[in-house]
Image (tube, rainbow, N blue to C red):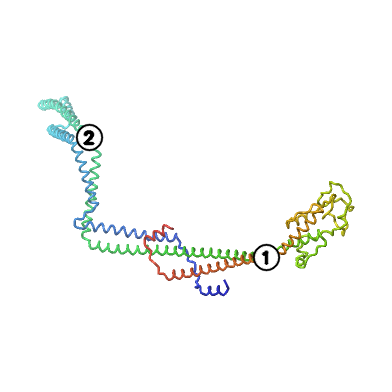
Amino acid sequence: MSSATTTAAAAAAPVVEKKQAPKKPDEEEFKKALAAQQKEHDAIKAKLTDVRAKLDSTKPGGRDPRQQELRDQMNQIKTQVASKKSVSQKLHDQIKTLQDSINARGKDLTSKQKAMPYRTLADLERQIAELDRKVNTGMMKIVDEKKALQEISTLNKQKKNFAVFEEAQKAIDADKQKLKELKEKKQDPELVELNKKFDELQKELNKLRDEQHEHSKNVNTLRDERTKLQKEQNEKWEEIKALKDTYYQGIREYREYTAAARKAREERYKKQREEEQLARNKKYAAEKLEEASAPAFSSEIITCNSLLTYFDPSHAVDASSKSLLTPSNLAATAQRTVDSSLLKGKKLVKEEESYFIGNPKKSKGKKNKKPAGAETEDAASVAPHGKINLNVGLIEQLGQIGVKAPSSQEEVKETIEAIGKKLEWYKENQKRVTEENIAKAKKELEKFEAEGSDVEEKVEAKEEKSAVVEEKKEAAPATEETPAAEAEEKKEE
């Protein structure tokens, strides 16, 4: 994409004003405020429930549930008490009969005791002793003495009555003890508890009846109180709803902002990575194009000329190849000029040394050190029976162009011909292969450039789409949260 197109697209895209990051609502503060308002709402609701119950009890035919419950409990107690009383009726009859007998005998004994001049036997005996003492003194007159003796006789007769009284009293006391035992047997603890509970329920029922009577007198006051409490309850509910709406709206805005910021950051990093990768690809393609622009088979042609010069010193390098024979590009150079006398004959050496390849073992000291200008015979040496030895560098160069290394003097000519054919093929195909390499490198570069323009178009499209969505979101009216939505938001929290 050209710079003009990019500038035009950037100008066409709407400018999005950067929003200030919203503050995340404090959850703890929200919970404290919500709990306080909920507590006030519950208190108002409890008062309203109480007023409604009072009004229901004043309606014609209306009955207080608590009163009905108390009546039911009292009826149950009555039933239980009646069943227990029927069981103890026999004891009740025995107690009544014994009580009547004790009362009658007690009254009879009391009347007889009252008829006696002395209430106790001790008083009677004391009187008899006193009369005896007076008679024994001899100081009394005859008439008085007779009266005293007659009275003593009468009192002695009355002693028998006191014995009868004592026996009657013992019988009465025994019956009283029996009556006490019967009463204790009749007293059932469960029955006592039932009677006690019945009395408590009766008191509570009487209290509720009195309150109901008072409520009936103040119906209008109760209705006004109900209306007032209903209004307070609705107002408190609206406050709770507004508190929840504000909190959850803040949570939504904070989440939307953080999600948008995270998405923008990820897209920015992605764009940066794509641009860096694109730059690396372009650099790689440019380097490949630069490499492809160099003539093909340059190193192979240089190697062929170098080998031909070595095996055939009379080989002349043509003008097209001389440009490649720079010191920095030479892959191989002639080690020495072949002496024709070397091909005719040489000093005999041992047969086991004829196939030795590599430099001879260096001896210590300067005895075997060659002069600086002396030609080494390590490159190639003619062995007995026409064999030839080559150093490792020459063998590697021959292998690079796919030519077999000669093993004897007779194979040198074939090697020169093979190298010449290779050189000729490289020269004939050099232009074609170079053009193919350049075309391939250009195609790869064009591909990377096309990918780069495609990435830029995608980024611009994303930015433009984000701007449009942001404008629509700002223009859209705020919607009221439903209880279901509030519950869903709370669930997500």
Instruction: Find residue 177 and report its image quarter.
Output: top left
Question: Label 2 vs label 1: CA separation?
Answer: 136 Å
In this rendering, the label closer to the viewer, 2 or 1: 1
Q: Disc 1 marks which amino acid?
A: Arg
Q: Position of residue 111 (x, y in %)?
A: 12, 34
In percent of width and height, residue 121 lies at 18, 29
Can residue 11 be seen in the rendering of this structure? Answer: yes
The answer to whether residue 31 is left or right of residue 460 is: left
Residue 244: image location, x then y, percent: 40, 62
Q: Which residue is mark 1?
A: 432
Q: Amino acid at mark 2?
A: Lys
| Observer-nearest of 287 and 98 | 287
Q: Quadrant of the C terminus?
A: bottom left
- CB atoms of marks 2 and 1 within 8 Å: no
Secondary structure found at label 2 = helix
User: In the image, 72: left or right of 454?
Assistant: left
In this rendered view, identify the residue nearer to me: 175 or 235. 235
Residue 206: x and y in percent read 21, 51
Image quadrant where one finds the N terminus = bottom right
- In the picture, the disc for residue 185 is 2
Callout 1: helix, strand or loop? helix
Question: Relative to 77, is 231 above or below?
Answer: below
Q: Which mark is residue 321?
A: none
Asked whether the viewer can see residue 130, the reply is: no
Q: Earlier in the sequence, mark 2 or mark 1?
A: 2
